[in-house]
Amino acid sequence: MKIVNFAKENREFVIFSIFALIILLVAIFAPALATHDPYEAVLNDSLQSPGREHLLGTDVLGRDLFSRILYGTSTTVSSSLILVGIIFVVGTALGMLAGYFGGVMDMIIMRISDIMISFPDLILAIAIAGILGSSLGNAIIAITVVSWTKYARLARSLVIKIMQSDYISAARLTGSKTPHILKKYLFPNILPTLIVTAATDIGSIMLQLASLSFLGFGAQPPTPEWGFMLSEGREFLQRAPWLLIFPGLAIFIVVMVFNLLGDSLRDVLDPDTNRINKKCRKKVIENEFKKDCKGIRRNSASNWGIKWMWK
Amino acid sequence: MSEEAILEARYLTRKFKTADSRVLTAVDNVNLKIYKGKTLGIVGESGCGKSTLMRMLVQLDTPTEGQIIYRGKDITDSKGKSLRENHRRIQMVFQDPMASFNPRMKVLDIISEPLLNYKLIKKNERKNIAKKYLKMVDLPEEFMDKYPQNMSGGQRQRVGIARALTLEPEVILCDEATCSLDVSVQDHIIKLLVKLQREKDIAMAFICHDVALVQSLAHKLAIMYLGNIVELISGDKINKEAKHPYTKALIGSIFDIGVDQNTQIETIESEAPSPLDLPQGCSFQNRCPHCKEICTIKKPELSKLKGEHYVACHLYG
């Protein structure tokens, strides 16, 4: 019953979670859904257009594009999720420490994050991936180094705001020690905002990863990864446009679903917007009520008492 | 006085540096004693340093100068373990009952947390403890599973009092603990505090800007004006024997139902000067009807008038 009510109130969120779930299922069951072996090169079938044998056509090595995209889902989605997870943990932890302890700790952490912010994201990531060498793991490290600052800053500012509130003073007075305050007071109170940020970030992180792969710093052949597939197909833009259209479409769909999921999650989790919604609802009810009362008032228009009461 | 002073402030001063590096003196050379089983009321208008004083007494803030003495021991600079021990003895009830609770904790956790922090109870005793203290503050047991945001202001403040009581402190400081509540609820909370104080013989300091309210429960009153204590007087004598012009003005501002509609309401002229830019001499000079030449030159000291009555005013110096 509760679930039904929840679903009714958060229709958007439920719809997008179902989409996201479908994407995850596709990633997991790619081997079962694929029609061909994504690694098997059949040079005779090179650059075939979409048709019955190859649903979305083949690439220059004659590999089935549909199967490669399906397999690519798991690479792309899992690496993006891992990446967001790492950034979330690292950024939040550093930001909380900076906000809680302040002073030298704050200085060091925030100056490092300033350095990171002063470079364009992708270029710094390219530099780091270039130094470490091209591989999917290194691309993940490169993007982590570039992106944790956002979470650190957010966590820090939220912590600083909470630190000024009375309940932290009260916690100190009642003998709470630092780890306890961090665990029971700060973390649960900053979590919703950070989770929403992370959810909306999945899409853009996916794009960053695809960009790195497209530039050749991420996944290495023959791993099916969408960004890298785009890069491979670029040479055949005129002869085989499906090599660009379908992986691009896959990126577009997945990024959009995760972005919208993040947005709807904000509506569910963020207490502020929630409250506004409830207020609106309350107002609607009140207006209905007032309309009803208008009838009464008209009937006894001379009755000043009632008029005054409803003012 | 024969009673023993539990908590004492000696020459307590707190100065804040503002962004443009001027100095704001929030509390200036304050001396106070809080006695066992007695209530000290601290009255003053907004911004006179009451809350800063209180934060220093519970050691959430450190004084710029002066000492805080607990049972004859200087605890001003205690840190770490000893600070934690002091917190256990000196508790506080906060002004805003909404802001003083973690919105993600249930009443059960709020009440049992202090005891768990000091390892005075085990985890499985939490419910019994919560029951005991909820009963003490006249709340039903079922409140254990509520979140503070789902309770009314008065109920929340009761939980706040319960939390302050759990560690069985010797001193409780109430920072305008009733000012955000309805008048009828205020009355209940005050009665509760007085009852609990009698039962447990707790020393209490009660900050308030409502003279009428605070004189009903305080044994002694300290009137603060711009960081200074201008008068120290017994609670029951304030109506008749108050001497300082500011105290008199405060008493004059009390309304009650029986007030004569025809008498003119006396107001204090002009605004209090900025604490950033205090005038030389008495800080009340620009609003005082009896201002003399000496008031603009020399700052009056708190001096004994008779018995336990102290005034800082040149008229009675």
Image: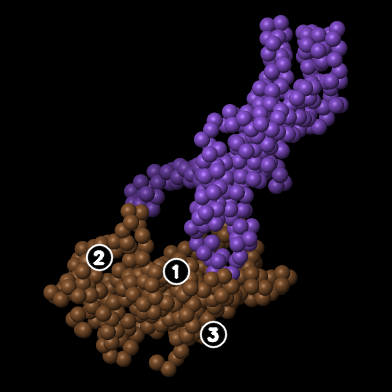
Chain colours: A purple, B brown
* Residue A98 vs residue B266, the one in the foreground: A98
- Mark 3 or mark 2, which has the lower sequence index? 3
Residue A171 lies in what quarter of the image? bottom right
Instruction: Give residue B199's mark.
Output: 3
Q: Are marks 1 and 2 on the same chain?
A: yes
Q: Is residue A173 above or below residue A119?
A: below
On screen, residue A256 versus residue B38, left or right, reads: right
Which residue shows up at 36% across the image and 66% down it? B15
* Residue B263 vs residue A136, the one in the foreground: A136
Output the chain of dot 3: B
**Amino acid type, callout 2:** Leu
**Amino acid type, callout 3:** Glu
Circle 3: element type: helix
Evaluate whether residue B274 shows in this view. yes
**Amino acid type, callout 1:** Thr
Circle 1: element type: loop
* Residue B226 vs residue A122, the one in the foreground: A122
- Mark 3 or mark 1, which has the lower sequence index? 1
Q: Which residue is mark 2?
A: B278
Instruction: Give residue B62's mark.
Output: 1
Which residue shows up at 38% across the image and 53% down it? A309
